[in-house]
Image (tube, grey):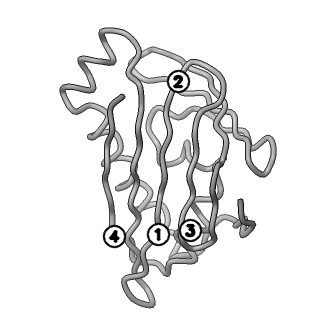
């Protein structure tokens, strides 16, 4: 199993960064390779991704969710095997550090080589940068929020 850890500082309050992250169906707007996410229940999402021409579908379960602190998940069904957590750290009233840690199991030679060459790390770094631009462009106003705990 491989892992990646990346972070980004965003110029929005912790509640805005957290609230936006809970809007999984907006992920295709800032995550390359994510074509669609359907929120099926409070704790179950269905993902459709396409990276380098390879399409995958899988379900992910939210295993822990604490408002303004963390969202953790693991895949439960489908073609991808991964787990991770995103944490939110208040830097001051208007700035937040968003940290993503992910464990994943590359499938096949191409994914293993891509992992060794740092493709996943670069993808995560890019996605976090696009999240930063997405939420800051909205002046810290999130598209929605889910404040429940899991």
Q: How far apart are marks 3 and 4 (CA)?
A: 13 Å
**Residue 74, percent from left and from top:** 57, 39
Q: Give yes or no for contact between labels 2 and 4 (Cβ–Cβ under 8 Å).
A: no
Mark 3 crowdedness (10 Å alpha carbons): few <14, some 14-19, many ≥20: many
Q: Distance between the residues labelled 2 and 1?
A: 25 Å
Q: Name the residue under label 1.
A: 88
Which quadrant would residue 112 be assigned to in this image?
top left
Q: Earlier in the sequence, mark 2 or mark 1?
A: 2
Question: What number is the disc on residue 7?
Answer: none
User: Which dot, 4 or 1, sits closer to the camera?
Assistant: 1
Q: Which of marks 3 and 1 is nearer the N terminus?
A: 3
Q: Name the residue under label 3.
A: 18
Q: How far apart are marks 3 and 2 (CA)?
A: 25 Å
Q: Earlier in the sequence, mark 3 or mark 4?
A: 4
Element under disc 2: loop
Q: Give yes or no for contact between labels 3 and 1 (Cβ–Cβ under 8 Å).
A: yes
User: Which dot, 3 or 1, sits closer to the camera?
Assistant: 1
Q: Mark 2 points at which residue?
A: 80
Which quadrant would residue 2 be assigned to in this image?
top left
Q: Give yes or no for contact between labels 3 and 2 (Cβ–Cβ under 8 Å).
A: no
Residue projecting furthest to the right: 41
Q: How far apart are marks 4 and 1 (CA)?
A: 10 Å
Q: Which of marks 3 and 2 is nearer the N terminus?
A: 3
**Residue 68, percent from left and from top:** 57, 74
């Amino acid at each position: 199993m491989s892992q990646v850890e990346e972070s980004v500082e965003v110029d929005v309050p912790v509640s805005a960064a957290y609230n936006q992250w809970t809007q999984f169906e907006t992920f295709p707007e800032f995550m390359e390779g994510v074509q669609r996410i359907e929120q099926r229940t409070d704790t179950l999402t269905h993902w459709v991704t396409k990276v380098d021409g390879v399409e995958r579908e899988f379900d992910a379960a939210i295993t822990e969710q604490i408002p303004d602190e963390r969202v953790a998940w693991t895949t439960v069904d489908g073609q991808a095997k991964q787990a991770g957590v995103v944490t939110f750290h208040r830097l001051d009233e208007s700035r937040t550090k968003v940290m993503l840690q992910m464990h994943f199991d590359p499938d096949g030679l191409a994914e293993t080589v891509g992992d060794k060459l740092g493709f996943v790390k670069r993808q995560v770094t890019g996605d976090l940068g696009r999240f930063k631009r997405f939420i800051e462009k909205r002046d810290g106003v999130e598209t929605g929020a889910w404040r429940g705990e899991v």
